[in-house]
Amino acid sequence: MHILIAGGAGFIGANLCRALLKRGDEVTVIDSLYTGKRANLDDLPLRFVEGDICDRDLLQRQFSPDRLHFDGVMNLACPASPPAYQAKPIETLLTGSLGTVNTLEIARVHKARYLLTSTSEIYGEPAVHPQTEEYRGNVNPVGPRSMYDEAKRFSEAVVTAYATTYGLSTAIVRIFNTYGPFMQPDDGRVITNFLNQALVGAPLTIYGDGSQTRSFCYVDDLIAGLLAMFDSHENGPINLGNPQEVTIRELVSAVKSISGKDCTVTYHPLPGDDPTRRCPDITKAKTLLNWQPHTDLHTGLQAVWEWFQR
C-alpha cells in the first residue's frame, strides 16, 4: 500500500515509517519539522514533503489524485510534549482542527483508510480508573494543556463526522505515554528528562511528590498496535498503552538502575492540570485487535538509554 503519514518525521512517526517500509509499503511523509527532525528519516527510501497540513493549497498541489494515489492516511501531526504545544497554542489548535479536516479531505478524495492518533489527554484528570474508551473525561477547556486536549477532542469529533457523512473508513486510537528511540532529548517528557539528567549526572527532577502514576509503553509495541488498528475494520476509539502503572518515584529507581548512576533527586511544584493517575483499560485492544504490549519497562529503558548515549 501507499501510505501518507502526516507528522512522519517525529518520534512515533519515524518508528512507524520504518515499520511500514519493512513490511513492503510505500511511504510519503509530510511534516512541518516543528518538533520532527528530517534527519530521523535520512536513511529511509521514502518521499518527503516539508509543509504544514493546515496549508490546503500545498496539500492539493502535492497530493492530488492525478499525481499519485494513497491507500491510507495516518495523521500523527501535532506537538505532543507540553513545552512544544504550550509554546505554540494557536498553531496546535489549528493543527488539530483545520489540519485534521485537510488530511481527511485527502483520504476522502483518494478513498483511503484514515487513522488518527489521538491521546490519553482526552481523559484529562480522570475520575475513572483505569480509563475505558467510554469514559468522557475531565478536561479543563481553559487550562494550561487545553490547546492540546481540545485540539484532539475536536479532531476525534471531525473524524467521526467524516465517517458518518461520507462513509469514510476511519480509525481513532488514543495513545498513552510512549517512549523509545527517536525521542527528542529536550521534549520535556519525564523519561527524556530523567535520562538526560542521568547522562550528565544532574539531579533528577520530580514534579509533585512522585506518587503520581503513568503507564509507559515501548514504541515498538505501540507501532504494532497502530498497524493492527490500521489493518482492521475497527473505527475506535481504542486505547493503546501499557496497563502497568508506574509511579514517578519507581521510574526514578529504574533510571538509576539502568544508568548505573546514583543521582540525587530534587522536587518542584506540580504543573497545573498535570494528571495524578493515568492508566489505560486495553480490553478493546486485546479483544478486537489481538494486541497488548510485551516490552517490560527495564528492557525498554535500557534500549532508550543506549540510544541516548549514542
Image (cartoon, rainbow, N blue to C red):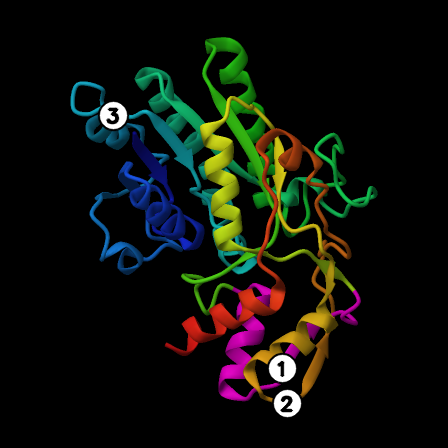
In front: 133, or 185? 133
The magenta stretch is 188-211
Whether residues under marks 2 and 1 lie with C-beta atoms below 8 angstroms apart, the answer is yes
Identified at 60% across, 69% down, the residue is 298
In front: 111, or 223? 223
- In the rendered image, residue 205 lying in the magenta stretch gets the answer yes
Identified at 46% across, 18% down, the residue is 169
Residue ID for mark 2: 262
Residue ID for mark 3: 60
In front: 174, or 232? 232
Q: CA distance from mark 2 to mark 1?
A: 6 Å
Q: Say the numbered circle drawn on residue 303.
A: none
In x, y percent, where is residue 249? 74, 73
Q: Secondary structure at mark 3?
A: helix
Residue ID for mark 1: 256
In x, y percent, where is residue 6? 37, 39
Identified at 50% across, 54% down, the residue is 219
